[in-house]
Each structure stands twice: as structure tokens, then as C-alpha cells.
Image: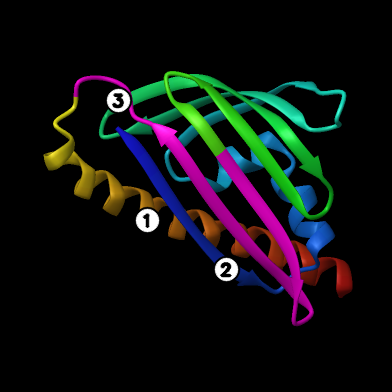
């Protein structure tokens, strides 16, 4: 079953601050509700990350790696996801009104013989909630950091 989710939020922090925060895999694990582990494996030749992940959804744990296929500081990072979940995660960082418009979009395959008609609405609801919480958590982390550096 293919899943798509996306959302965005305005953050009261400079693009460079938001990009630097999201470029660190351990920070992504700290702000993503169901991401229980994200560890850098290496910096790639394009300067992006290759990282190991562990993600839990509905009591199931999924593991694998993400690799930055597109790395354009401070505007965009696109990760290709491999392992139990396969797909793509993209982050856009756009200057807006003295802050940053942070946009998240993901398309991935949920493995296994799942009854799509029954689970698709539940998975969509879960993902919308998770992405909203993720963006709220990023705002809390980077806005506090941005205020501390300007004080």
C-alpha cells in the first residue's frame, strides 16, 4: 500500500537554523514522534547524510536506512528510504516573513498483505497527526534556539 503525507508550518527562525537542525539525524529522532532511532552512518559525497532509522507504527517496528539523494543547503533535502519501508521523504526550507516555511512530504510503501480498504484511512489519519506533531516539535526546538542566539 502506498502512503502519501505532507504538511507545512511557518517557523520563527532563520532558514539556516532550521536546515542545520533538520540536517542532524539525531535531531530528527528527537522531534519525530514515532521515530525511535536515527543515527548518521556517514556523510555522503554530496554532503548529505546516510542514516539508519527505526520507526514504530501500530506496535510494529520498521528499520532501514535513508540516504540524501538531493542535498541543497539551506533549501532542500530529499531522502530515499530503504529497508522495511521504502520511499522518499522531502524537506523544503523557504524564507518567509522573517522566518522559515518548513514543508515535509513523504511517499512510502507499507509492507505486507494489509487490507488496504480498512487500513488506508487509519494510516492516513495517523500520518497526518504524526506530521503535525513533528512540525510542532521542530518549531519548539528551533524557535527556542533562534531566540537564544539573538538574545
Q: CA distance from mark 2 to mark 3?
A: 28 Å
From the image, tell me which residue sits under label 3: 60
Is 81 left or right of 117, judged from the image as shown? Answer: right
Give the mark, 2 or 3, whose residue is nearer the N terminus. Answer: 2
From the image, tell me which residue sits under label 2: 9
Q: Quadrant of residue 43?
A: top right
- Who's the residue at 82% across and 46% down the image? 72
Q: Locate the C terminus by quadrant.
A: bottom right
Q: Secondary structure at mark 2?
A: strand
What segment is highlighted magenta in the picture? Answer: 89-113
Q: CA distance from mark 2 to mark 1?
A: 13 Å
At which x and y percent is residue 75? 78, 55
Q: Which mark is residue 99?
A: none
Q: Secondary structure at mark 3?
A: strand
Is 115 left or right of 17, judged from the image as shown? Answer: left
Q: Are marks 2 and 3 in contact (CB under 8 Å)?
A: no
Foreground residue among 87 and 150: 87
Q: Nearer the viewer, mark 2 or mark 3?
A: 2
Give the mark, 1 or 3, whose residue is nearer the N terminus. Answer: 3
At which x and y percent is residue 22? 70, 47
- Who's the residue at 75% across and 82% down the image? 97
Is 132 left or right of 45, judged from the image as shown? Answer: left
Q: Which mark is residue 128?
A: 1
Is 44 left or right of 87, judged from the image as shown? Answer: right
Dot 3 surroundings within 10 Å: few (below 14), some, or many (20 or more)?
few
Q: Secondary structure at mark 1?
A: helix
Q: Locate the N terminus by quadrant.
A: top left
Q: Quadrant of residue 34?
A: top left
Amino acid at each position: 500500500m502506498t502512503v502519501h503525507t505532507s504538511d507545512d508550518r511557518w517557523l520563527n527562525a532563520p532558514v539556516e537554523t532550521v536546515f542545520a537542525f533538520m540536517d542532524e539525524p539525531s535531531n530528527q529522532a528527537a522531534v519525530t514522534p514515532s521515530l525511535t532511532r536515527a543515527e548518521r552512518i556517514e556523510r555522503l559525497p554530496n554532503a548529505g547524510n546516510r542514516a539508519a532509522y527505526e520507526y514504530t507504527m501500530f506496535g510494529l517496528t520498521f528499520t532501514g536506512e535513508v540516504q540524501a539523494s538531493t542535498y541543497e543547503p539551506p533549501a532542500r533535502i530529499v531522502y530515499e528510504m530503504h529497508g522495511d519501508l521504502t520511499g522518499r521523504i522531502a524537506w523544503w526550507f523557504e524564507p518567509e516573513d522573517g522566518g522559515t516555511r518548513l514543508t515535509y512530504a513523504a511517499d512510502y510503501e507499507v509492507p505486507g498483505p494489509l487490507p488496504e480498504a480498512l487500513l488506508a484511512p487509519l494510516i492516513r489519519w495517523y500520518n497526518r497527526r504524526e506530521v503535525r506533531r513533528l512540525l510542532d516539535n521542530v518549531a519548539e526546538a528551533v524557535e527556542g534556539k533562534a531566540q537564544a542566539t539573538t538574545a
